[in-house]
Image: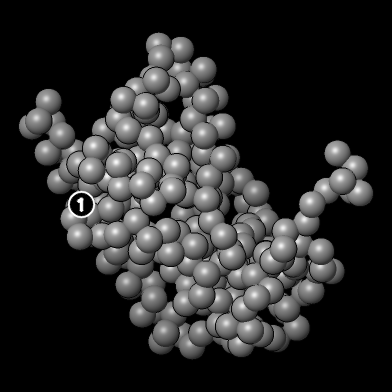
Amino acid sequence: MSLKDYKYPKTETVDIQIKLRNYGPKDPRFSGSVKLQYETRKTVKVCILGNKKDFDDAKEKGYDALSLEDMTKYKTKDKKLRNKKVKKLARKYTGFVASQSLITKIPRVLGPGLSKAGKFPAVMETGDSIEDKVTEIAKTVKFQFKKEVCIGSSIGHLDLKPDQLKTNINTCVNFLVSLLKKNWQNVGTITVKSNQGRPQMIYPSGNVEEQSQEDLLKRQAFIKQVEREERFKKEEERKRAEEEA
């Protein structure tokens, strides 16, 4: 496809790229997600992995959806073929939402593909609406360090006001810094760019408001608490799944 034929999005997305320093392949891996105050994309494409009730509700509201029966079509003895299909599925959507009753079954049916893509489904519990979960995905930024020293993500779009973009950037950057072993000492450069715009370096020029040490420690403590709760929840779900089996 030539540049002449390329159709640019009506509303440009703003991306952030953070280059780490003094961080290498031997350093501890980390991952985390943070919900921003404003949406990171004007539109998101979400797939609902639902039980009968949530599947029917999603279809009625115009969302893409897969039932458990649909998902089992990805399960084959050839793991490479399954992983290839799931990887293609993950690329098709911004994120996934799954019914609470199916969340423990998804890894057994689809394998680790969605987790590796950083798109493991958000859980839709009783009383949650699909619209709320889609909004949550639109406002959530995920970071995952494996080997690359450059980490990037969408943090807004050009329909947001400058102050709203700044709020998203500050929240996003300070969250990532809290995941790093030496915090700001591990940050090399921070650059933001819209789809068609020129890259703008905002750090180390001083345009990002750094957190105080007290706020940083509070955020780190909060992250550890959330991680403990998630581990406990996963362990409970695993035990429940074993009992049902």
The mark total stands at 1
- Name the image quarter holding residue 193: bottom right
Q: Quadrant of the N terminus?
A: top right
Q: Residue at x 15, y 34 (%)?
A: 241
Query: Where residue 84 appears, x then y in whole percent?
Result: 54, 24
Query: Where residue 17 appears, x then y in whole percent?
Result: 68, 63
Query: Where residue 86 appears, x then y in whole percent?
Result: 49, 30
Query: Where residue 191 appears, x then y in whole percent?
Result: 73, 69
**Is residue 134 depicted above or below 121 in this figure?**
below
The residue lying toward the viewer, choosing from 17 and 65, is 65
Q: Going by the picture, which residue comes out furthest to the front? A: 60
Q: Is residue 132 left or right of residue 238?
A: right
Q: Is residue 87 left or right of residue 190?
A: left
**Crowding near the residue tagged with mark 1, few <14, some 14–19, many ≥20 C-alpha atoms within 10 Å:** few
Q: Can residue 78 be seen at all in this image of the molecule?
A: yes
Secondary structure of residue under mark 1:
helix
The residue lying toward the viewer, choosing from 215 and 155, is 155
Colouring style: one colour
Q: Residue at x 48, y 67 (%)?
A: 139
- Name the image quarter holding residue 135: bottom left
Q: Is residue 13 left or right of residue 76?
A: right
Q: Residue at x 51, y 75 (%)?
A: 38
Q: Going by the picture, which residue comes out furthest to the left? A: 243
**Is residue 167 depicted above or below 86 in this figure?**
below
Q: Quadrant of the C terminus?
A: top left
The residue lying toward the viewer, choosing from 15 and 57, is 57
Q: Can residue 174 be seen at all in this image of the molecule?
A: no
Q: Residue at x 18, y 55 (%)?
A: 126
Amino acid type, mark 1 = Lys
Q: Going by the picture, which residue comes out furthest to the top? A: 77
The residue lying toward the viewer, choosing from 186 and 194, is 194
Query: Disc 1 marks which residue?
Result: 233
